[in-house]
Amino acid sequence: MTCTLGEVKNRADFIVYWGGNPAECHPRHFTKYALMPKSQFLPRGRKDRTMVLVDIRETKSVKASDVFLQVRPGKDFELITVLRAMIKDQPISEAQIAETGLSVEQLQDFVARMKAARFGVFFFGMGLSMTRGKHMNSAALLTLAAEMNAFTKFVAMPMRGHGNVTGADVIMRWQTGYPFGISFNRGYPRYNPGEFSTVDVLVRGDTDCAFIIGADPGATMPKPAIEHLKRVPTIVLDPHVTHTSKMARVHITTAPAGISAPGTAYRMDEIPLPLRPALESPYPSDEEVVRRIKETILKKPDWMGERPQMLTTQV
Amino acid sequence: MDLKVIDNATCTFCGCVCDDIQLHADENRIHQAKKACVLGKAWFLNHTAERKYPDALIDGKEATLDEAIEAAAEHLYQADMPLVYGMSNTTCEAQRECVEMADHLGALLDSHTSL
């Protein structure tokens, strides 16, 4: 259950940032969409909105918040579960509340504010989705947002980083039906994060050639994964010679997207936006290079031989 | 010095993808990114149109684009289980080409999302 940032800007009077630090990671999120804008429904802008920040430590975003709830690290799932019970007036023990690191009064106040809102939004960051519990935390928060709709309008939206990751999700969903963690090794797409997700594949040593575009795993991935990248032939497309390029067999310099390469990028609410490059680049775009590599591969015989349209036997 | 002004330019540094930036650029670099935040300014101002790096590197040695494309295609084709990964800092058009290439290769395909 989600919405666009335009709806947030015009209608949302109750904003919750959970496990994120927008003041430093998405600096214009407050002013452009979530807190400051005035609209027909929120004529006084910031004064018509309430912002609650849920995080494990005090970040710079605290200053922008009306209420700061400091949850005990790794207890987000427990806190969401307690809230789900409280909105339905189900009994909760004091021990269960104490475990979250917050007081009964704080939670009762939060629940009252959520129910009093006309349009509430949960923006959740990597502090929720990438810590203990991972996707289970995101799923729990989405459930809480869905259940809040018994009382008022509530939505949830992930705070995406890294430029066009949202675009990658959208394009893979469009082309394969799945957003990430895909394998084509049977000739049709299969989805299984944990088996086909990159870190797991690299740590297990399950790939014998890596093609890396618009990412620098050499700087971000765990050591065993990087060790495997060094073992296999790696191909890197990047505007800079990166950590990963230095361990790669092939590096191709490309024009940076949005600066000197045109195209489309998706905003975190899945709105596609055209890029307007300002500079001419001496390098080709990613699109051109990938297309040429693909065309070179297509000239070679198909690895599957005759491609079956349908599997005739169970494999 | 004449500066080219680009209105409503799009910043792809973070997920906000602000599309109201005004860029002032000459042929070589962007001098001003109005309305952009600190992160966006750094992103726009740190890129230039100069040829700072070689076109391509094969095994650490400078190579031409054509040679690198041939080498990349050969490595991917020879592999039993190639992996296509990343796709964050690039355009949807390039992502689409990546998906098609992974399909032809019978490859693994994944993005930053799974990290």
Image (tube, coloured by chain):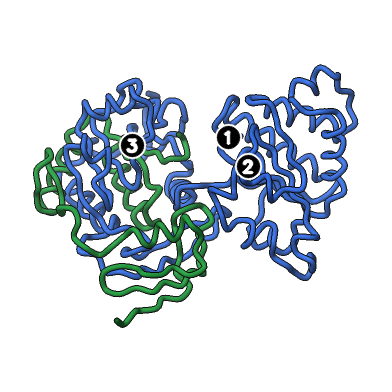
- Residue ID for mark 3: A187
Q: Residue at x 48, y 42 (%)?
A: A179
In 3D space, how far apart are the residues under numbered discs 1 and 2 (Cα atoms)? Answer: 8 Å
Query: Quick check: can you spot residue A305?
Result: no
Q: Residue at x 37, y 53 (%)?
A: B90
Q: What color does chain A have in the rendering?
A: blue
The lab-note entry on whether marks 2 and 3 share a chain reads yes
Q: What color does chain B have in the rendering?
A: green
Identity of the amino acid at label 1?
Ser
Against A181, residue A13 (above or below) is: below
The lab-note entry on whether marks 1 and 2 share a chain reads yes
Identity of the amino acid at label 3?
Gly
Q: Position of residue A83 (x, y in %)?
A: 79, 32
Q: Which mark is residue A124?
A: 2
Q: Residue at x 58, y 54 (%)?
A: A269
Sequence-wise, the earlier of marks 1 and 2 is: 2
- Residue ID for mark 1: A129
* Chain under numbered label 1: A
| Marks 1 and 2 close (CB-CB < 8 Å) | yes
Query: Quick check: can you spot residue B112?
Result: yes
Quarter of the figure with residue A93: top right
Quarter of the figure with residue B4: bottom left
* Chain under numbered label 3: A
A209 sits to left or right of A273: left
